[in-house]
Amino acid sequence: TPLMTVKVFVSRDSEGRPWPPDYSHEVNACQAIVSDIYYRLNHHNQLYVIVANLHQPSADLVVITERGLGVAELKGHGGRITVHKNGYWYADRQLIKAGGQSDTPHEQVQTYARKLRQALWSFIAPETLRYKSWQTGDLKFQTAVCFTNPSAELSQIRTVFQDPSRIERAPWE
């Protein structure tokens, strides 16, 4: 049998039925991202696990590898995406709202990754983890905000995030 190195999971409700993402832009984006990951990585020896629409702790998309975890927040806004001096994100003139108590999508995805990291460490004792990077506590979490609308224009926000003094990263990122 061929080696299957990319595995995909979708959250399930209390009765075991698939619990797809709440928004159509998330469904389409998850399908596109999973397809791309499968196409690019399925021939590798490492295992890649993708979890879509995780509920507790919350995250739109989680990618798990032996090197770490990636947590992505999917936003369907179009137009010019900007970060204003007040720190808030806008799509043209519309405020981009973040879930939970977060002020920005970046803070939102960092909160999800922090909760996921805490849940992982409380659920699995570090000495039982297979990979050395996990055993030493060096497991890295990367976060991303992905704009799923093809009309999203990201030049200003890219400039902001390329300047390390403008963005606060958690120590595990």
Image (cartoon, rainbow, N blue to C red):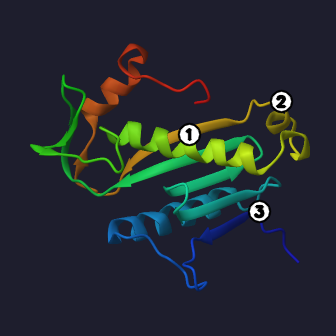
Question: Residue 48 at x, y = what percent?
Answer: 71, 56
Q: Is residue 104 above or below residue 30?
A: above
Q: Sequence-wise, which precedes: disc 3 or disc 2? A: 3
Question: Which three-letter amino acid code belongs to the residue tagged 3?
Answer: Thr
**Percent x, y of residue 10:** 58, 72
As displayed, is residue 112 above or below residue 134?
below
Task: Tell me if mark 3 has few (under 14), some (14-19) or many (20+) residues whose alpha carbon lies within 10 angstroms of its own.
Answer: some
Q: Element type at marker 1?
A: helix
Nearest to the observer: residue 153 or residue 16: 16
Q: Is residue 19 left or right of residue 41?
A: left
Q: Quadrant of the N terminus?
A: bottom right
> Label 3, on which residue?
5
Q: Amino acid at mark 1?
A: Arg
Q: Nearer the viewer, mark 1 or mark 2?
A: 1
Mark 3 to mark 2: distance in Å? 25 Å
Q: Residues within 10 Å of mark 2 (few under 14, many from 20)?
A: few
Number of marks in picture:
3
Q: Position of residue 69 (x, y in %)?
A: 65, 45
Residue 67's image quarter? Answer: top right
Q: Is residue 53 above or below residue 86?
A: below
- Label at residue 70: none
- Report the mark closest to the observer, 3 or 2: 2
Q: CA distance from mark 1 to mark 3?
A: 26 Å
Instruction: Give me the residue at 55% from left, 54% from top.
Output: 57
Callout 1–callout 2 Cβ contact below 8 Å: no
Q: Residue 136 has which mark? A: 2
Q: Which mark is residue 114?
A: 1
Does residue 18 sit above or below 163 in this rendering?
Answer: below
Residue found at x 63% / y 70% = 9
